Image: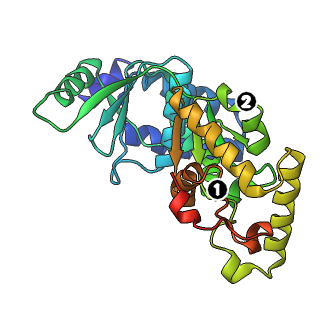
Amino acid sequence: MAEEAMAEGLILLTTDTIIFLHQVLTEAMYRSKHAIFTLFFSLLLGAAKGQMLIPMDYEGQSDHLKAYGLVYEAIASGYDCHWLLNYRGGSFAILDGDQNIIEKALRKGISYENSSAQALLNLMAELKSPSTNTNSIELERVPKIAVYSPAGKQPWDDAVTLVLTYAEIPFVTIYDEEILNGQLEEYEWLHLHHEDFTGQYGKFYGAYRDAAWYINQKAQFEADARALGYSKVSQVKGAVAKTISSYVNNGGFLFAMCSATDSYDIALAAEGVDICESMFDGDLSAPGAALQLD
């Protein structure tokens, strides 16, 4: 059959073959730099045109983070994308995959599987069955993402910004000043990570109070609070937490992790109550502060 197909001028390629040839051709292009290889690679991609299943299970995906970034870009570009919940790690289906998206997957080292439109539609119908703990969700638009992080931090200082940067998912970093100035409303998704909204600088005082970085950070936070019109760091952090709460009540999405999950709620519960001891803000906490929490 293969000989007959070749005799008729057809090209039969599997996904593994395409990836292998891509690697071979890439190395050859670097060595010879002949334009013919670029042309041949384009022909291969054209032959691979079709619907795509992007697996997200451990066995099927070689780069999960890059895969998320590719799907984000595909949605933003108007491709017909679907999220297959509880199927092979939450895989994705792109019903109108083309040469452009396939080329990006190959170059980024993302695993994908060619499929027919009917096969994917049948799979999506099965996943929607009430008898299964699965579903298929159409992904229509991407959110504008903001990450709550100081401007001076590098992407590798924070796990969230590191992951988003590697995945090539666009985001902006905002902090206290931007949130209090109303800029949070420009975004649909806010991510909180290592942050203490109570103004007590996390759990670092006990072990690092004499460290230069802790002393400098505390001084910078205090200076920033004064610049924003607050006398204490706990006050500005409380105002930020309250602004975020209003943002969520108005439909914004919030994803909090690590210390942000607890300290955010504590800051809201402690509105108007001084819960910080003198080592954090220079004076004692309010008498019976714990009993005054909302």
The residue carrying pointer 1 sits among few (fewer than 14), some (14 to 19) or many (20 or more) residues within 10 Å by Cα, namely some
In-image side of 103 versus 217 (left or right): left
Identify residue type, mark 2: Gly
Give the structural element (helix, strand or loop) at label 2.
loop
Whether residue 14 appears in this view of the structure is no
Q: Nearer the viewer, residue 144 or 182?
A: 182
Please give the count of numbered marks on the rendered protein. 2
Q: CA distance from mark 1 to mark 2?
A: 25 Å
Residue 152 placed where, x, y %? 81, 53
In-image side of 279 versus 125 (left or right): right
Whether residue 188 appears in this view of the structure is yes
Farthest residue toward the left?
131
Give the structural element (helix, strand or loop) at label 1.
loop
Name the quadrant containing residue 111: top left
* Residue for point 54% across, 26% down: 250
**Disc number placed over residue 110 in the picture, else none:** none
Farthest residue toward the front?
287
* Residue for point 66% across, 37% down: 171
Residue 81 placed where, x, y %? 41, 24
Name the quadrant containing residue 217: bottom right
Q: Nearer the viewer, mark 1 or mark 2?
A: 1
The residue that disc 1 covers is 273
The residue carrying pointer 2 sits among few (fewer than 14), some (14 to 19) or many (20 or more) residues within 10 Å by Cα, namely few
Residue 139 placed where, x, y %? 42, 24
* Residue for point 69% across, 30% down: 35
**Disc number placed over residue 182 in the picture, else none:** 2
Does residue 5 sit above or below 244 in this rendering? above
User: Of label 1 and label 2, which has the lower sequence position?
Assistant: 2
Residue 285 placed where, x, y %? 68, 67
* Residue for point 27% across, 41% down: 86
Identify residue type, mark 1: Val
